[in-house]
Image (tube, rainbow, N blue to C red):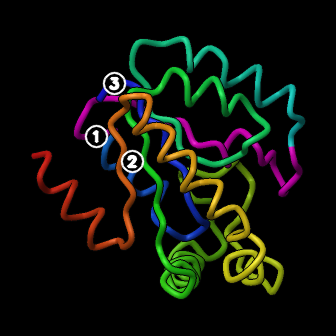
C-alpha cells in the first residue's frame, strides 16, 4: 500500500481512516475537503484543487481521501494501488456526522479547510441521508473496476469493519 485512494459517504469515517492509516504507514494524508473549502466555507475552484492535488498524485506514496469526481479522479484511480470505499449505511453516517459536529463545535476539524468551523444543518443532514448517496452504484462500480485492474480493493460496510481491518495492519 503506497498510493491509497479513499472515497465514500459523508460521515462514513473516510478522514479518520486516512489519518489512522497515515500514522501506520508514515504517509501524510491529503483531504479533499481541505482543498475544496477555503476560510468561511467558501468553495475553491476546480483549477485550485487540481493545482494542489497534481503534485500529490505524482509522489511515490500518498493517501488521498475524498470524493470530488471532477477533480483528477481518473488520475487518482489510475495511479492508486489501493482503493477503499467506505460504504457505511446512511443512519450510521448521520450519527457519526452529528457526533463529530458536537466534538468540534465552534472549531475547525483537522481534515477541513482553515476557518470552516464545524456545522451540522438541515442541508448537510439531507446530503448525508439522501443526496450524497445517489452515486453509490457508481462508487461500487469504481471499486469493482479497481478489482478488475488488479488493485487492492476494500469496501467497508461499517466503522467496526474499518477498525478491525486497521487493527490487522499492526
Q: Which residues are magenta?
A: 22-43
Q: Position of residue 73 (x, y in %)?
A: 67, 34
The residue positioned 89% from the left and 51% from the top of the image is 42
Q: CA distance from mark 2 to mark 3?
A: 15 Å
Q: Is 104 situated above or below 135?
A: below
Label 3, on which residue?
2
Q: CA distance from mark 3 to mark 1?
A: 13 Å
Would you call the spot at circle 3 few (<14 residues within 10 Å), some (14-19), or many (20 or more)?
Answer: some
Q: Is 40 situated above or below 50?
A: below
Q: Nearer the viewer, residue 3 or 99?
A: 3
Q: Earlier in the sequence, mark 3 or mark 1?
A: 3
Q: Quadrant of residue 132?
A: bottom right
Q: CA distance from mark 2 to mark 1?
A: 6 Å
**In front: mark 2 or mark 3?**
3
Label 1, on which residue?
23
Tag 3's secondary structure? loop
Q: Position of residue 62 (x, y in %)?
A: 44, 26
Amino acid at each position: 500500500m503506497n498510493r491509497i485512494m479513499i472515497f465514500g459517504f459523508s460521515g462514513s469515517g473516510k478522514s479518520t481512516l486516512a489519518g489512522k492509516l497515515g500514522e501506520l504507514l508514515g504517509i501524510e494524508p491529503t483531504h479533499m475537503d481541505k482543498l475544496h473549502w477555503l476560510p468561511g466555507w467558501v468553495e475553491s475552484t476546480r483549477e485550485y484543487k487540481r493545482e494542489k492535488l497534481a503534485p500529490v498524485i505524482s509522489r511515490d506514496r500518498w493517501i488521498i481521501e475524498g470524493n470530488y469526481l471532477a477533480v483528477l479522479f481518473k488520475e487518482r484511480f489510475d495511479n492508486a494501488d489501493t482503493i477503499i470505499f467506505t460504504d457505511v449505511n446512511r443512519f450510521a453516517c448521520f450519527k457519526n456526522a452529528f457526533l463529530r459536529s458536537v466534538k468540534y463545535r465552534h472549531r475547525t476539524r483537522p481534515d477541513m479547510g482553515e476557518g470552516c468551523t464545524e456545522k451540522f444543518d438541515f442541508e448537510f443532514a439531507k446530503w448525508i441521508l439522501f443526496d450524497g448517496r445517489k452515486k453509490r452504484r457508481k462508487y461500487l462500480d469504481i471499486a469493482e473496476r479497481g478489482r478488475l485492474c488488479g488493485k487492492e480493493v476494500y469496501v467497508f460496510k461499517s466503522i467496526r469493519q474499518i477498525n478491525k481491518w486497521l487493527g490487522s495492519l499492526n
